[in-house]
Amino acid sequence: MIQRMIDFAMFRIPTYRAVEADASALGQAMLVVVIVAIASGVTGLGVEDEGVSGLIGGVIAGLVGWAVWAWITYFVGTTIFNTSQTHADWGQLARTTGFAQSPGVLRVFGFIPVIGWLIALVATIWQFAAMVVAVREALDYTSTWRAVGVVLIGFIIALAVVFIVLLVFAFIVALLFGAAD
């Protein structure tokens, strides 16, 4: 699994294709998402309001976000951006997009003063590039730009979904705790 993470980070296309075809790699992809979520959350461990509960929440949010984004990219890629060569299922997108998060392990260095934010930014851009390659390979596109479109539209839709869920959650919390007053 570690070698696959390195290969994804290094944009080694044969590994992208191997993960796409390996139905047994879904658990590994999920583990990559968990590892990246933990690496991202380590910097919050010293924050009084975050702590371990924030780390656990981050892992859960990472897993849910990954599954939803995989489904959105699958849907957008096989409907709106479909080509005659496009043949994919959700599992292929889930596996490849999970491993595409591999560069995010660098976020573990986000605590470093002055440059921590820069490391996190580089990791995010690197993840985006790996996501584009993952989508291109999983959806059998010949155009990288088509994959960029899928990733961008998928990201916008995912943000909208998260925003709506947060609004609903805030509304429910306001109802529950507002009624207690």
Image (tube, rainbow, N blue to C red):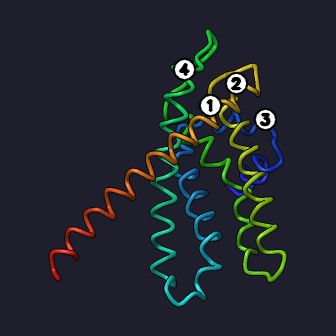
| CB within 8 Å, label 3 to label 4 | no
Name the residue carrying label 1. Answer: 150
Q: CA distance from mark 1 to mark 4?
A: 9 Å
Task: Give the residue at x 53% y 54%.
Answer: 30
Q: Which residue is mark 2?
A: 146
Mark 4 secondary-structure assignment: loop
| Amino acid identity at mark 1 | Val
Q: Are marks 1 and 4 in contact (CB under 8 Å)?
A: yes
Q: What residue is drawn where x is 58% and y is 84%?
A: 45
Q: Earlier in the sequence, mark 1 or mark 4?
A: 4
- Whole-Å distance between the Cαs marked 2 and 1? 6 Å
Q: Residues within 10 Å of mark 3 (few under 14, many from 20)?
A: some
Residue 140 percent coordinates (x, y): 67, 22
Q: Which residue is depicted at the point 76% across and 61% down?
A: 121
Q: Which residue is mark 3?
A: 13
Q: CA distance from mark 1 to mark 3?
A: 19 Å
Tags 2 and 1 touching, CB below 8 Å: yes
Which of the numbered marks, if any, corresponds to residue 80?
A: 4
